[in-house]
Amino acid sequence: MPNHDAQLLHLEAATRRRFLCDAGLSLGGVALASLLGNTASADASGATTLAHDKPKLHFAPRAKSVIFIHLAGAPPQHDLFDLKPALDRYNGQPCPEEFLKGEKFAFIKGHPTLLASPFKFAKFGQTGMELSQLIPNIGSIADEITLLRGMKTDQFNHAPAQLLMHTGEARFGHPSMGAWLSYGLGSAKAQLPSFVVLVSGDKTPDAGKSVWGSGFLPGQFQGVQCRTVGESVLYLDDPAGTTRASRRAALDAMRDLNGLSPFADESTRARVEQFEMAYRMQMSVPEATELSNESAETLALYGATPGQASFANNCLLARRLVERGTRFVQLFDWGWDAHGTSPDDDLLHQLPKKCMESDRPSAALVLDLKRRGLLDETLVIWGGEFGRTPMVEYRNGKKEFIGRDHHPHCFSMWMAGGGTKKGFVHGATDELGYFATEGVVEVRDLQATILSLLGFDHERLTYRHAGLDQRLTGVVKPSRVVHEIIA
Amino acid sequence: MGYVGHMRYGAAFLALLLAMAMLLLFQVQPLIANTVDDATLRPVDFDAEVLPIISEHCFRCHGGVREMNGLNLITRDRATQVAKSGAFAIVPSHPESSEMIRRINLVGGAKQMPPATSALSAQQRALLERWIAEGAQWEKPWAMQEIRDEASPNVRHASWPREDLDAFVLAELERRGLEPAPEADRQTLLRRVSLDLTGLPPEPEAVAAFLADEGDDAYERVVDGLLASPHYGERWARLWLDLARYADTQGYEKDLPRTMWLWRDWVIDALNADMPYDEFSLRLLAGDLLEDATEGDRIATAFHRNTLTNTEGGTDDEEFRIAAVMDRVATTWQAWMGTTFQCTQCHGHPFEPYAHREYYEFLAFFNQTADVDRDDDAPILKAKSAQFGETSVLVMQELPAEQARKTHLFLRGSRVAPAEEVTANTPSVLPAMDASLPRNRLGLARWLFDPKHPLTARVAANRQWETLFGRGIVESSEDFSLHPQVPELLGHLATRLRALDFSMKAFTREIVLSATYRQSSVASATTLARDPDNRFFSRAIKRRLEAETVRDASLAVGGVLTRTMHGPPVMPPQPPGVWATVYSGENWKVSEGGDATRRSIYTYWKRTSPHPQMLALDAPSRETCTVRRTATNTPIATLATFNDPAMLDAAGGLARRALLEEHANTRARTAYMFNVALSRGASSQELDRLDAFVEGERERFATDTTARDAFLAALRTPDGTLDLSEYAALTSGANLILNLDEFLTTK
């Protein structure tokens, strides 16, 4: 039987919709509210949508917003988070046969050999969390974070693995986590989109815009990409030769003319509201994205430089957005796919470069949120779509550069704030860091946990589609909230 | 549930009933919105009304899995047997002797059923009572029942119907105490039908000619003209591009380009030629298997080659070949049968009409093609086009018999857990495949059009209706387990579609000539109160134009639309930086000359990064089959129509048209622009308001020539004799007009 509560929500939604219609309440109000995420997803044309009211929170939330930093391409856990002395001992030795049974690799050919990390680890924080010296700043916030060493996925190619991480399905067509949360939560304030996407590293993620798409949810829940160079949001800038005043005059005339139309109805009012909202966003988005308003000290903390496109700027921007009511900020940083085919994607050149770019701002974000009293209500998540092999990859047999191949069986992520434990390590891998052995957290368990911290039971945040009450964590295999990491 | 795997028809049917129960619980509008009046309109519908109640309240204990106190409500046979208590729960036609009725009316005590915590409402109790009084029938779910030729109902307002279908709409309205809306005025109707049939608004000359035409058949002739327009195919092909998940790239990580446009052109041409829907479908699914298949027949099969190809390193080709085959199964069911068949991919469900095994038997039809998820996308058909020279398209091609694949059932839907071998077959809940049909894609396509097939004609008729009315008779056009609002109307339409030999143009013609279609969208207060959601088609539905139509209509009224048909995809302007994707070295290079302003159906479609304006206006990414788009209303969408340079280009075009026509002054030019864009004259009040804005802009631009020049810099160079401030002000006014609610909707 489908979940009883889910059905109740549907009934509630349907009856409330009817009430709104019967009572003749302004649809415009509803549409406006929908943008704010307060009530319904009313339809522009006034006709074709099955409106879905916002589900209520299922329990008291620990976090109000999420900043999910996705290091696209997948950072190597053995070089950053998961120290394996055995790899030093067996460096260059063939990987034991028993690990390789039935294994497929994206690129490794032949019998692979083990690779010791070329980087040293050190103990950080009061708990002595062992982390790579490539990320000393993240080390400096060790006492603030929960480190997940037993992450596991079932996808070993970027696009499907990214889709799984963000939509709960390795196939296309499903809503992203941010879309689910916008659907559930909405934006706390009217002036900004509730789900914002920030991309650095020159490239969008492998799976394209689907990782912030709305899938089968209405399009209004898709992520809005926000940029620190050029127009902050596509089409946000007024055309050259217009002014705020002239655009205001146009909107005033538009509102009057829409009202004078013999076809004006509630949906007309809803559209007028959206134009007004856009007009306000034209002020509030540039204000939110204008990093030069930050103090020199803050800019230095992140290593941010206003006017650039950088990971550091995106971290700072994420804090500004969350501060202003955005519910879900998704960062994508491209360049972590360290196969070792050239200095642009190897462990000795590219990885230190990526760490240099991201270590300080990642830590700064947590520190900055903390000192502003926002960390308790903001969940920061940091990680890739899968892990990398404990074995070396020599592409085409060339040994000039070293890298690691894609690896689904274990990887590391960390979280901070939003009700997670501080200075805590959850999960572990075997001696070689091949399989997760303890505290295994599958991708959908992570998603269930994130929803839980935001006040949602992942089995009850549902949307009716294709004859099923769909949910982020899928309807097939049960997922579990990782209570062990919740403070 | 083990029995599902071996079900014969009876068991499948039961499972189906139960499935419907699950799906219907809270989706069936009458349950929510029923008034006492509604309840007596027709005999109780078991499937729609009773099953949801007993499924929700009774099946947990009496649903077959458990038979508490010997009572099993799954089948009529079992439910009418004596229970352990010695009583009969249901005595057909005798509610007074039925223990069920006695128990549901008890208040308190252990004998009350269902227990007090989930007691039935008075309305539900009355419904069950009436159902038993009417004989306690256990009917098949509506969509699985054969399509009946519905008798035309009697209506009081006998002069209103113009087409047979109108009687069905009117009968329902009259049953509900509703009146149809008056006929829309002629300009409104012309604009609506032009946009609906061709995706373009009428030119001012067409409006004038129609208004001047006093012939009784003026509207009919306009409709015939629109149906004959080559733009008809361009507009309706859009639906098939969404269903086919059509794009110009392979998808997944690299999302490299591939050549598919020959198929898009084939669809446009087939629709324009009014290829009957059965013939059309046969070619899409199995054109290559037709005897003496033509090149066109083979191009048509690219429909199912629009599946994604994964060229990412190290991917298992077999894994993604199977993913593509599964996608073809899902798409075939969605597009032709309005059903999400993939639910049974992993295992059967006790409440599902389809068994796990049946999914793989159906998959076997599609498991015999030569494509194998390789980078080269083979097999590819090389074709010679008179217009475009040598080109190519991905096609379906059956493997030779000696290479035929075996199909296995996959446990949990996982190909690494193959179980027994299965052979191609259709599910038992639907009419069996005729023995004369080959067990391949061709046979399958012909089976879809078996006169006894209950879904194909219904789904097609519903899709056409949905596109023309903004709402299907089955609102969830992707899911026919939910109920139609006016069942007899859908039955009638499906029958008509068959009677017209699946001519979509003839079918569409009947709909747009109907009194139902010609209604005004403006509703009376009574209508609004009694049919607030327009579930019974008591008026026309105001609809936001589809993404493509928003752009195409703007370009058309701006006089800058390039009407060239066919050919490789084009790249209209898009904001810089949108196409920064991994690996692909492809650049968005804006097409030159008129190609930048072709109809949107020709715009290059990259799956990982479709044109942002299309996305903002609710177009799908075309990674999977999309049956129905949902129009949403967001600030991002308003920015994409108000600020997009292409929209300004269109506005500039409209201003130039106004300047080139002979008009006395700014006000007259403004009036002209309003008229062209909205296909109606502005009221004096409207014109005053619009003119005031344009005059304000004119003053601003005349004073601030820097702003004027900046504004005009993005626009096409106007004729040197134009007054630049006037041109800029009119463009600003046109930009406003093209963002009015009335412009962005059909009304």
Image: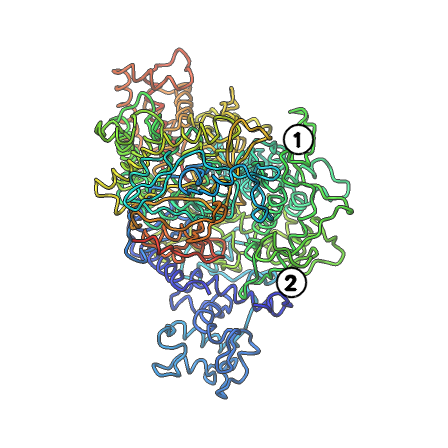
**Residue at x-position 47% and y-position 43%:** A86
Q: Nearer the viewer, residue B317 or B685?
A: B317
Label number found at residue B428: 2
Query: Marks 2/1: CA distance?
Result: 39 Å
Q: Amino acid at mark 1?
A: Ser
Residue B15 in picture, x, y percent from top left: 56, 67
Q: Quadrant of residue B227?
A: top right
Q: Nearer the viewer, residue B43 or B33?
A: B33
Residue at the far bottom: name it.
B86
Residue B745 seen in the figure: yes
Provide the chain ID for the residue under circle 1.
Answer: B
User: Mark 1 sits on what residue?
Assistant: B392
Residue A178 in picture, x, y percent from top left: 38, 44
Residue A109 placement, left or right of B549: right
Provide the chain ID for the residue under circle 2.
Answer: B
Q: Secondary structure at mark 1?
A: strand
